[in-house]
Image (spheres, rainbow, N blue to C red):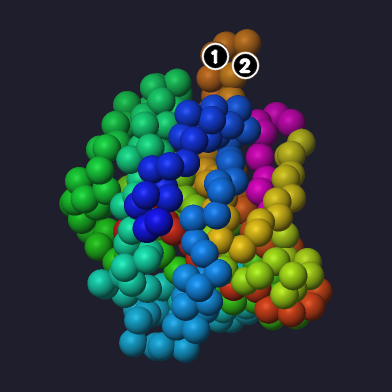
């Protein structure tokens, strides 16, 4: 089964319910072992990437990541295009709840045209590598004024090839202490989570809860992940 078929066969009704309830959700594996290993193997092909970041240089953490250049590898292009429409429906629902006035197109091509109108033309999907002692500080991936409310991270490594390295997601609740989530993935699974904020319902209606994400310290082994971000960068 090809990647578009795997995406369309997901139980999107259940996934959307869980996103609305918790703000994030883990999908069934969308990448098989061979595809995960192919992406890991291509990490050394520098011609595929437009930029390489050493996290420690910028005090982002300890590790390395690379942004893919255009054209994106077919696997990543299929994930990006295939995941977008259903997530755009949820994004529009959140926008209505929070009365932001923002409406997201229901196909990726139209959304990327909007990004280009804001001078955001650089692709943002990336691959990340952490070795023993590596970690990623809590952050957000915005890249400009135009951003999509969701992004997806896929675990490429076998979950038995490293220890530690849990995905961290933190709600920064207004006038209250923050709430954290520790999330573990299996190879090929995708985690959908908010890029900036999620809606939460209170006595006076919906309000924004800021979200940040990161990765806990790797105790042993090497961890590769693929980040699929839908908006482009300046």
Nearer to us in this view, 64 or 16? 16
Image quadrant occupied by the C terminus: bottom left
Nearer to us in this view, 95 or 48? 48
Q: Position of residue 132 (x, y in %)?
A: 75, 80
Nearer to us in this view, 85 or 117? 85
Q: Position of residue 218 (x, y in %)?
A: 75, 72
Q: Is residue 65 left or right of residue 160?
A: left
Q: Is residue 135 visible?
A: yes
Q: Secondary structure at mark 2?
A: strand
Nearer to us in this view, 76 or 38? 38
Disc 1 residue crowd, few under 14, some 14–19, many 20+, Cα 10 Å: few
Q: Which picture quadrant has residue 200? A: top right
Q: Position of residue 42 (x, y in %)?
A: 44, 83
Residue 142 among those drawn in magenta? no
Q: Secondary structure at mark 1?
A: strand
For the point 65% across and 66% down, the residue is 136
Badge number at residue 91:
none
Q: Is residue 65 visible?
A: no
For the point 37% across and 80% down, the residue is 49
Q: Is residue 216 left or right of residue 202?
A: right
Q: Position of residue 129 (x, y in %)?
A: 59, 76
Q: Is residue 164 left or right of residue 27?
A: right
Image quadrant occupied by the N terminus: bottom left
Badge number at residue 205:
1
Mark 2 sits on what residue?
Answer: 202
For the point 76% across and 36% down, the residue is 177
- Asked if labels 2 and 1 touch by Cβ distance under 8 angstroms, the answer is yes
CA gap between label 1 and label 2 equals 5 Å
- Give the vertical position of 149 relative to 156 (above or below): above
For the point 27% across and 37% down, the residue is 106
- Residue stretch rendered in magenta on the structure: 168-176
């Amino acid at each position: 089964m090809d990647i578009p078929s795997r995406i369309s066969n997901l139980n999107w009704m259940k996934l959307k319910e869980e996103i609305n309830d918790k703000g994030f959700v883990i999908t069934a594996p969308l990448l098989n072992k061979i595809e995960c290993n192919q992406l890991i193997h291509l990490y050394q092909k520098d011609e595929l990437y437009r930029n390489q970041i050493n996290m420690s240089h910028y005090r982002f953490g300890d590790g390395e990541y690379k942004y893919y250049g255009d054209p994106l590898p077919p696997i990543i292009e299929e994930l990006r295009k295939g995941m977008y429409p259903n997530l755009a429906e949820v994004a529009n629902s959140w926008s209505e709840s929070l009365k932001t006035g923002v409406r997201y197109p229901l196909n990726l091509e139209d959304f990327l045209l909007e990004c280009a109108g804001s001078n955001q033309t650089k692709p943002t999907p990336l691959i990340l590598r952490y070795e023993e002692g590596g970690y990623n500080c809590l952050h957000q991936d915005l890249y400009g004024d135009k951003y999509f409310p969701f992004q997806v991270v896929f675990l490429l490594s076998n979950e038995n090839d490293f220890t530690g390295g849990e995905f961290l997601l933190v709600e920064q609740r207004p006038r209250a202490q923050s709430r954290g989530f520790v999330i573990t993935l299996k190879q090929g699974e995708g985690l959908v989570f908010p890029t900036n904020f999620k809606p939460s319902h209170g006595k006076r209606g919906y309000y924004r809860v800021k979200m940040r994400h990161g990765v806990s310290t790797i105790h042993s082994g090497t961890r590769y992940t693929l980040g699929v971000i839908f908006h482009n960068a300046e």
